[in-house]
């Protein structure tokens, strides 16, 4: 009995010595990845909010002059640059399905700049706002906010692992 206890003690100590650093590194890496993804989501949200704000400020003038919305050349170039700067990390860190939702949102935002305001602001911006919500939901879900149910989490992970094993 003493031999079994000694063996269990030695085995558990060795397991702890070799397993703990690897587990710590794994969870630390996942935490860093999630932090980076959340920072990208925040930057994207700020850029889109600025775009909406500048478009809304130009709305009254565009209605009076019956012309497409203009968000200002400098801002449009800066906003476009910010979007493209964020687009690379989004492609690198997020799944293709999430990237498609972001691309759809960007298409709606680009289309918003070519529309002549012939209806109230809320109706005019509604397709872009809905695309923004869908894109943000997809981005946050990929980070794990809100947390998926255990069943859907296991199904998604098993499906991902099985698809990686196929030649």
Image (tube, rainbow, N blue to C red):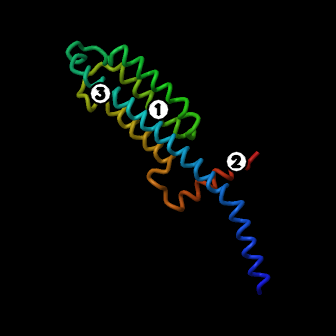
Mark 2 and mark 1 lie on one chain; the one further toward the N terminus is: 1
Helix, strand or loop at disc 1? helix
Instruction: Looking at this view, name the residue that lies furthest to the bottom.
Output: 1
Q: Position of residue 23 (x, y in %)?
A: 64, 56
How far apart in space, not on screen, are marks 2 and 3 (Cα)?
Answer: 43 Å
Name above or below for residue 49 compared with residue 150. Answer: above
Q: Position of residue 120 (x, y in %)?
A: 23, 28
Where residue 88 sits, quadrant-wise, is: top right
Name above or below for residue 120 compared with residue 165. Answer: above
How far apart in space, not on screen, are marks 3 and 1 (Cα)?
Answer: 20 Å
Q: What residue sits right under mark 2 in the picture?
A: 164
What residue is rendered at 40% in x and 27% in y? Answer: 109
Q: Position of residue 133 (x, y in %)?
A: 39, 40
Mark 2 and mark 3 lie on one chain; the one further toward the N terminus is: 3
Q: Which mark is residue 104?
A: 1
Name above or below for residue 108 compared with residue 114. Answer: below
Q: Position of residue 2 (x, y in %)?
A: 77, 85
Q: Between residues 45 and 161, which one lies in front from this camera angle?
A: 45
Nearer to us of marks 3 and 1 is 3
Nearer to us of marks 2 and 1 is 2
Mark 3 and mark 1 lie on one chain; the one further toward the N terminus is: 3
Using residue 133 as the reference point, say whether residue 59 is left or right of it: left
Q: Which mark is residue 53?
A: 3
What residue is rendered at 43% in x and 44% in y? Answer: 137
Q: Between residues 99 and 115, which one lies in front from this camera angle?
A: 99
What residue is rendered at 75% in x and 71% in y? Answer: 11
């Amino acid at each position: 009995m003493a031999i079994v206890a000694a063996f269990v003690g030695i085995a558990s100590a060795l397991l702890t010595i070799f397993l703990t650093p690897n587990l710590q590194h794994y969870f630390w890496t996942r935490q860093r990845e999630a932090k980076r993804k959340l920072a990208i989501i925040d930057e994207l949200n700020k850029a889109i909010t600025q775009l909406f704000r500048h478009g809304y400020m130009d709305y009254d003038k565009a209605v009076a002059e019956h012309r497409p919305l203009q968000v200002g050349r400098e801002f449009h170039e800066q906003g476009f640059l910010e979007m493209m700067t964020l687009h690379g990390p989004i492609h690198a860190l997020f799944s293709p399905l999430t990237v498609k939702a972001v691309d759809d949102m960007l298409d709606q935002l680009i289309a918003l700049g070519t529309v002549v305001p012939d209806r109230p602001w809320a109706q005019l911006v509604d397709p872009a706002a809905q695309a923004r919500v869908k894109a943000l939901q997809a981005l946050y879900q990929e980070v794990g906010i809100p947390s998926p149910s255990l069943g859907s989490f296991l199904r998604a992970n098993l499906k991902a692992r099985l698809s990686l094993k196929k030649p």
